[in-house]
Image: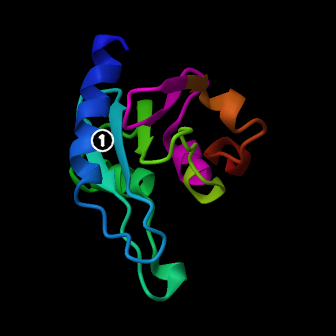
Amino acid sequence: MNDTQKKLFDLAVKAQKNSHSPYSQARIGAAILMADGSVHAGCNVENASYGGTVCAERVAIFKAVSEGAQKQISEVLVVSTADKPWPPCGFCRQVIAEFATEKTLIHTANNKGTIKTFTFPEIFPEAFTPKHLA
């Protein structure tokens, strides 16, 4: 891991500890680096009405936006307790698409530090973005 990935990993693991995941038992943490250099982290928050569940990636993005960060994502790191790192779900990929560029990096990791990196277009080709509405 490079220094940026390590910083994001550490913040994601810290956020992961706050996960509210009584139904899936899947503890997820995420950290994002915005273009302005700010970093924001979040964890998954499950709800008995499954549709009310919010993934860690979206929590981190919503925090960044609500805290006034520049609205462009440079990197996302998602950490799961699974042996094989989990990628963002489709819903999260769509929310990331709102703030991503072709250069946005998506890192998936597990708690052991196994990491795999993708560019956003690799993980979500042909994404529907704000450009489609212009």
The stretch in magenta equals: 93-116
Residue topped by disc 1: 12
Viewer-proximal residue among 54 and 115? 115
Q: Is residue 62 magenta?
A: no
Q: Is residue 115 magenta?
A: yes
Q: Quadrant of the N terminus?
A: top left
Position of residue 64 measured from the top left corner of the image (x, y, whole percent)? 29, 47
Residue occupying image coordinates x 52% and y 81%: 50
Using the rendered view, name the quadrant where residue 17 is placed: bottom left
Position of residue 79 measured from the top left corner of the image (x, y, whole percent)? 41, 41
From this view, report whether residue 108 is shown above or below residue 65.
Answer: above
Residue occupying image coordinates x 46% and y 34%: 109
Q: What colour-coding does the image apply? A: rainbow
Residue occupying image coordinates x 30% and y 62%: 19
User: Which residue type carries mark 1?
Assistant: Ala
Task: Describe residue 102's horizontal placement relative to residue 17 as left or right.
Answer: right
